[in-house]
């Protein structure tokens, strides 16, 4: 049987080159590995910790119905800043000759699953109805507008209609990527929440999986926006988990309590650091505490966190940041951070932005920088200015909440 050995050298490149020049393979400090299923990794792992971690529920087992986010194939055409913009655009796009439409909107060449004519036909067949204008979560804290039909290879390349239809009504979803990114022991891919349909690249290139909390009954009509059949929505949570927790807590738990508990756990820095090596290779697994009071307490912290990320928290009514300076509100430069201020041009800035908040990342995006950078060349509206002040506040309070979650997480696995 083949044997696997592992060795590594830490340090700067020059030091590594020097070692390689003076030594050979025989002088390396090798350790024998015993790769385990299901990944059979050729790197050292804490086998004891892995055994504990693998007992926990995997997120894909908890929420059986899931999908990656929407692939538009042409963001500049399909995503708008507001309803008026996207409504005018779809009307104009639908009536233009295909080649003129291609040139007008700089759409480039057709690809296999997105073609100008298919997109135009989808709009026309939908009846061009204003009720098809919906919110889409495009990036963290960045909700925009799109025209949604749910038809594949139409206006959107892959609209994920079978899943996203559950987010066209009152609902929430947790968005979680596989193989979380990290720097050393710091894992920053985390997760995010949405109450509307979700773009594929919400917080990371390559996409995240979207797990709605509730599933709604099918409709008799094909129209995604028609009234739902009579019948109750059902939780998108595996029934066996409810049974397990009922036995554990000797109480019934609600779908929301499970959902927000999970959200809190995934934002625990303690959890992310402890299981960093496993989070980098697969979907996260969730440890459920045996302490009912702790389960409820963490769930409440998760709910607070979710409300901040949806910008629905009452704590955002008095934001900590203000928009100051003279001149217009046009973003003329890449955001510049200096002395707890974020400048959008030579004179206008958002104040009271702590460095920790400025650097805060969700997935691959540094939120405070990314949100403004995407608006370069635009005059910020009053609503956008207020939103950014809320984002700064939400991130500041997120950091505070993560500390509270960590204080309580210590008891989860005891």
Image: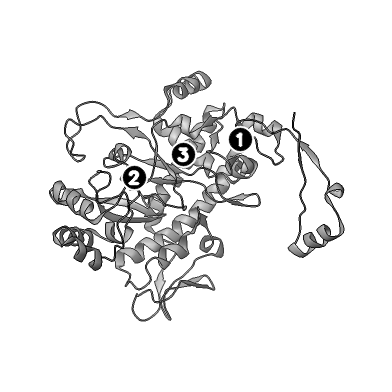
Crowd tier of the residue under label 2, counting other residues whose Cα lies within 10 Å: few below 14, some 14–19, many 20 or above: many
Q: Give the residue pinned by disc 3.
A: 300
In terms of secondary structure, where does tag 1 sit? Answer: loop
Q: Position of residue 158 (x, y in %)?
A: 32, 46
Q: Where is the C terminus found, in terms of image quarters?
A: top right
* Circle 3: element type: helix
Residue at point 47%, 65% (across, down): 369
Q: Nearer the viewer, residue 60 or 343?
A: 60
Q: Secondary structure at mark 2?
A: loop
Real-space CA distance between mark 3 and mark 2, rounded to the nearest whole angstrom: 18 Å
Q: CA distance from mark 3 to mark 1?
A: 35 Å
Give the image location of residue 105, x and y in percent: 26, 65
Q: Residue at x 54, y 73 (%)?
A: 339
Q: Is residue 258 left or right of residue 279?
A: left
Residue at mark 2: 195
Q: Earlier in the sequence, mark 3 or mark 1?
A: 1
Q: Position of residue 41 (x, y in %)?
A: 65, 38
Res 39 label: 1
Label located before the other in sequence (1 or 2) = 1
Name the spot of residue 286 as percent of width and height, x first: 54, 34
Crowd class of label 3 (few under 14; some 14 to 19; many from 20; radius 10 Å): some
In this rendering, the label closer to the viewer, 1 or 2: 1
């Amino acid at each position: 049987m083949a044997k696997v050995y592992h060795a590594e050298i830490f340090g700067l490149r020059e030091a590594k080159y020097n070692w390689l020049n003076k030594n050979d393979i025989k002088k390396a400090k090798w350790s024998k590995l015993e790769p385990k299923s299901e990944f059979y990794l050729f790197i050292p792992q804490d086998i004891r910790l892995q055994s504990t971690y693998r007992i926990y529920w995997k997120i894909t087992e908890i929420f059986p119905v899931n999908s990656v986010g929407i692939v538009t194939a042409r963001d500049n055409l399909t995503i708008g800043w507001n309803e008026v913009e996207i409504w005018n655009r779809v009307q104009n796009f639908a009536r233009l000759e295909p080649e003129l439409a291609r040139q007008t909107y700089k759409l480039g060449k057709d690809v296999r699953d997105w073609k100008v004519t298919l997109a135009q036909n989808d709009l026309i067949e939908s009846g061009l109805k204003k009720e098809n204008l919906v919110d889409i979560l495009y990036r963290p804290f960045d909700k925009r507008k799109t025209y949604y039909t749910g038809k594949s290879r139409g206006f959107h390349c892959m609209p994920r209609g079978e899943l996203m239809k559950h987010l066209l009504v009152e609902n929430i979803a947790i968005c979680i990527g596989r193989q979380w990114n990290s720097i050393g022991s710091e894992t920053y891919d985390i997760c995010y929440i949405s109450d509307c349909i979700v773009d594929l690249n919400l917080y990371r290139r390559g996409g995240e999986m979207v797990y709605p909390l509730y599933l709604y009954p099918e409709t008799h009509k094909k129209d995604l926006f028609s009234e739902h059949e009579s019948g109750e929505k059902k939780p998108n949570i595996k029934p066996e988990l409810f049974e397990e927790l009922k036995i554990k807590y000797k109480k019934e738990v609600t779908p929301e309590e499970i959902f927000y508990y999970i959200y809190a756990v995934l934002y625990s820095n303690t959890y992310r650091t402890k299981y960093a090596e496993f989070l980098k290779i697969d979907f996260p697994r969730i440890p459920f505490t045996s302490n009912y009071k702790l389960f409820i307490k963490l769930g409440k912290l998760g709910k607070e966190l979710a409300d901040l990320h949806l910008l629905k928290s009452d704590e955002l009514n008095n934001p900590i940041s203000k928009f100051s300076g003279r001149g217009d509100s046009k973003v003329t430069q890449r955001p510049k951070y200096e002395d707890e201020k974020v400048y959008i041009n030579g004179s206008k800035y958002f104040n009271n932005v702590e460095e920790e908040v400025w650097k805060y990342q969700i997935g691959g995006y540094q939120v405070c920088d990314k949100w403004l950078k995407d608006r370069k060349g635009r005059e910020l509206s009053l609503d956008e200015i207020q939103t950014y002040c809320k984002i700064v506040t939400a991130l500041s309070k997120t950091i505070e909440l993560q500390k509270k979650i960590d204080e309580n997480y210590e008891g989860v696995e005891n």
